[in-house]
Amino acid sequence: MAGNSFGTLFKLTSFGESHGEALGGIIDGCPSGISIDFNFIQQELKRRKPGQSKIVTQRKEADEVEFYSGIFEGKTTGTSIGFVIKNTNQKTKDYDHIKDVYRPSHADFTYDEKYGSRDYRGGGRSSARETVCRVVAGAIAKLFLKEITITAYTSSVGNIQLTQEDTINFKEIEQNVVRCPNAEVASKMETLITSVKKEGDSLGGIISCVIENVPTGLGEPVFDKLHANLGKAMLSINAVKGFEYGSGFEGTKMRGSAHNDIFDTHKKTKTNYSGGIQGGISNGMPIYFNVAFKPVATIIQKQTTINTKGESIEMQGKGRHDPCVVPRAVPIVEAMAALVLADFILLQRRFNSTQ
């Protein structure tokens, strides 16, 4: 299986399955001398881990990371950082009934077609549990980025969404289980998720992200545009179906005279429909984008599907699953954004050194 690495200079290679002994990774390219706040990394993992509230999967995992290399006396050494997160609460028997069944909208069929076999225990490598490795690497990338602030939050769940009239308070994000920056809207989202969970169904939603204090000059103008790599990063996350930055699709309804970002005498723009990126390169304004997540594929309702013999059968999801993945995906979006920015910071340093 290829495609287990992400990044050019600041690179993460991950390994492991949902119901294997452990998941882990190797981070290459992290500069030396970065102070590692282990409590911060663990807190980032806590934001993603299962069982954190009644509206997410009740799988109980401590998600404690163990580092094996690349850190000495609390600082990075510049060598490869190796880490592992052990699985401790697998319930493989919950998946015995789908051993020879292709679940709708899962990777079961495509894995079988491509590899001739699949790990049916929670989806194996295709499980969203793999993202625990991204959060570890993303936390270290955040420690490297220092001055850059990355803030993601839930902006919609199902048909409930933040509007321009709603007050957004970033301090509110971690004060509610859905990670919405508006308490009133968050309450409505939580009620909806709880209701849908009782029906054995699932919901999708949107995560918005704002990146502040980004230096100018990050990104390459052709195939490695900054927004293109951010898009790839977000679309690599499980259940993501869409990515838009800046004015996005709404910008198509505007005229150029209104959409153009006019510069002031301080080299800032009066508006920011560009989303902080022009010509594929950061312009110093805040970067903002939206990531769309589909409804979770595993639902506790009966569905018609086929088995490995191509026979039509009826199946029903079992075990512990998120009715809406969006709240737990907020730190994952931040982590992937941090990995992209860390990579481009290092690429820009290399470019500057050759000038």
Image (spheres, rainbow, N blue to C red):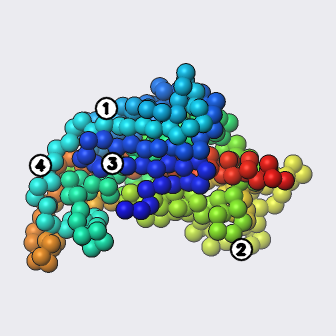
| Kind of residue at badge 1 | Ala
Where does the image place residue 153, in percent across and percent down from the top left? 49, 46
Bin the neighbour count of mark 2 within 10 Å (Cα to Cα): few under 14, some 14-19, many 20 and up: few
Secondary element at tag 3: strand
- Residue 49 falls left or right of residue 184: left
Viewer-proximal residue, 81 or 42? 81
Viewer-proximal residue, 214 or 272? 214
- Distance of mark 4 from mark 3, alpha carbons? 19 Å
Q: Is residue 140 above or below residue 266?
A: above
Identify which residue is drawn at 81% across, 60% down: 262
Bin the neighbour count of mark 3 within 10 Å (Cα to Cα): few under 14, some 14-19, many 20 and up: many
Where does the image place residue 98, in percent across and percent down from the top left? 14, 61
Secondary element at tag 4: helix
**In front: label 3 or label 1:** 3
Q: Quadrant of the N terminus?
A: bottom left
Q: Earlier in the sequence, mark 2 or mark 4?
A: 4
- Looking at the rendered structure, the number of numbered marks drawn on it comes to 4
Residue picked out by circle 3: 16
Q: In this orientation, does residue 34 appear?
A: yes
Residue 93 marker: 4
**In front: label 1 or label 2:** 1
**In front: label 2 or label 4:** 4
